[in-house]
Image (spheres, rainbow, N blue to C red):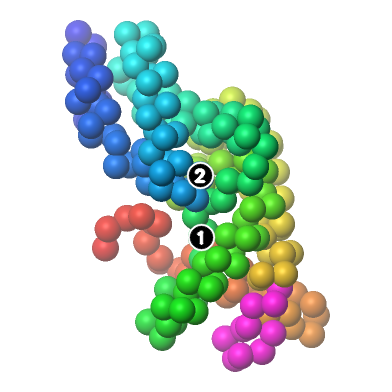
Amino acid sequence: MPHEKPGSPEGGDFAAYATAAWPRLVRTAHMLTGDFHEAEDLVQTTLAKVYARWRRIPRDDVDFYVRRSLVNNNISRVRKRRVAHLLTPFLPERVHEPQAGHADSVAQRAAVTQALAGLSARQRSVLVLRFWEDLSESEIAELLGCSLGTVKTHVRRGLTALRAHPVFAAAPGEDGSSGRSGGGRRPASASPFAPPPHSPVPGARP
């Protein structure tokens, strides 16, 4: 039997793999869909398709295959329904600060979600894989079956679209002024998807 990587399923035990991977897959699916129930449905659909091909999936490549299937199934779901499925937002750092009240956090979360609704399913997928799953751009390109340049373009255009949205353009700066300075550019601290130095990976335990 070939050597198994740590944490990978052994002996073709799909049930054991699905049980262990379920929480992580649901968290990732939640980032893709913005809805917990939609996330569970997406993971169930993905695992059903994985099960159908389980015997043919290399045991050292299961996570890669499942991630790719999850993302592709979400893109297909969005295209078929032709409705906006919102991504759980990556909020500006100020929302996570202790002084931010619950009501303010909820309002800002809703506003950012509105901004993210304008992203394409592909851009949303790339941003989730890059900033939530913490994959490199090369890994994303391999996973999605596209070129590295395409991934870079999706990241750049996705972030540009978020920064240009009125939700971010009108966000107040740290001094209480408008997010746009005299030069018409927003301060870097209010930029979406820009974690502070030495910040932990999203979703990681402290």
Which picture quadrant has residue 141?
top right
Q: Name the image quarter holding the N terminus.
A: top left
Marks counted in the figure total: 2
Mark 1 Cα shell of 10 Å, populated few (<14), some (14-19), many (≥20):
many
Q: Residue shown at 51%/44% (left/top)?
A: 32
Q: Residue flagged by tag 1: what amino acid is it?
A: Phe
> Does 147 appear in magenta?
no
Q: Residue shown at 59%/29% (left/top)?
A: 76
Could you say whether the residue bearing mark 1 is in a helix, strand or loop?
loop
Q: Residue flagged by tag 2: what amino acid is it?
A: Leu
Residue 15 position, x and y percent, is 22, 23
Residue 62 visible to the viewer: yes
Which picture quadrant has residue 162?
bottom right
The part of the chain drawn in magenta is: 169-178
Residue 68 visible to the viewer: no
* Image side of residue 98 versus residue 109, left or right: left
Q: Earlier in the sequence, mark 1 or mark 2?
A: 2
Q: Residue shown at 38%/21% (left/top)?
A: 48
Q: Is residue 95 above or below residue 45?
A: below
Front-most of residues 127 and 26? 26
Residue bearing mark 2? 32
**Main secondary-structure element of the magenta-colored stretch:** loop
* Image side of residue 105 versus residue 83, left or right: left
Residue bearing mark 1? 90
